């Protein structure tokens, strides 16, 4: 995580998945499910005070 936190261009890794510093596609299809993402985002946003709708 330290490597990703200190990368020179953070936009180049924003939202990407990594395994041992190698960029990979997520193996679980649920990671690309927009409905599940929204179901997770909304309660998380409420708990942290962030906007409740995904962009």
Image (cartoon, rainbow, N blue to C red):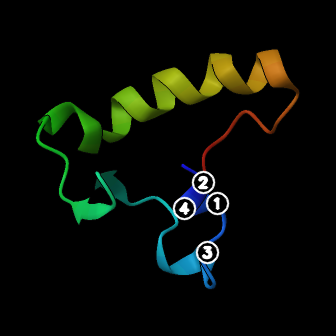
Q: Mark 3 points at which residue?
A: 10
Mark 2–mark 4 CB contact (< 8 Å) = yes
**Front position in the image: 54 or 18:** 18
- Residue drawn at 83 percent across, 24 percent down: 48
Mark 2–mark 1 CB contact (< 8 Å) = yes
- Residue drawn at 61 percent across, 84 percent down: 9
Mark 4–mark 1 CB contact (< 8 Å) = yes
Q: Is mark 3 on a helix, strand or loop?
A: helix
Q: How far apart are marks 2 and 1 (CA)?
A: 5 Å
Q: Distance between the residues labelled 2 and 4?
A: 5 Å
**Front position in the image: 15 or 32:** 15
Which of the two discs, 2 and 1, sits closer to the camera? 2
Q: In which quarter of the image is residue 45?
A: top right
Image coords of residue 54 (percent x, y): 60, 46
Q: Earlier in the sequence, mark 3 or mark 2?
A: 2
Q: Name the residue under label 4.
A: 4
Q: Mark 1 points at which residue?
A: 5
Report whether 15 appears left or right of 9: left
Q: Earlier in the sequence, mark 4 or mark 3?
A: 4
Q: Mark 2 points at which residue?
A: 2
Q: Quadrant of residue 37?
A: top left
Q: What element carries label 1?
A: helix
Around disc 4, counting alpha carbons within 10 Å, would you say few (fewer than 14), some (14 to 19), or many (20 or more)? few
Which of the two discs, 1 and 3, sits closer to the camera? 1
Around disc 3, counting alpha carbons within 10 Å, would you say few (fewer than 14), some (14 to 19), or many (20 or more)? few
């Amino acid at each position: 995580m330290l490597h990703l936190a200190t990368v020179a261009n953070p936009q180049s890794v924003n939202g990407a998945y990594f395994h041992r510093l190698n960029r990979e596609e997520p193996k679980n299809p649920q990671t690309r499910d927009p409905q599940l993402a929204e179901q997770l985002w909304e309660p998380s946003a409420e708990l942290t005070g962030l906007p409740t709708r995904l962009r």
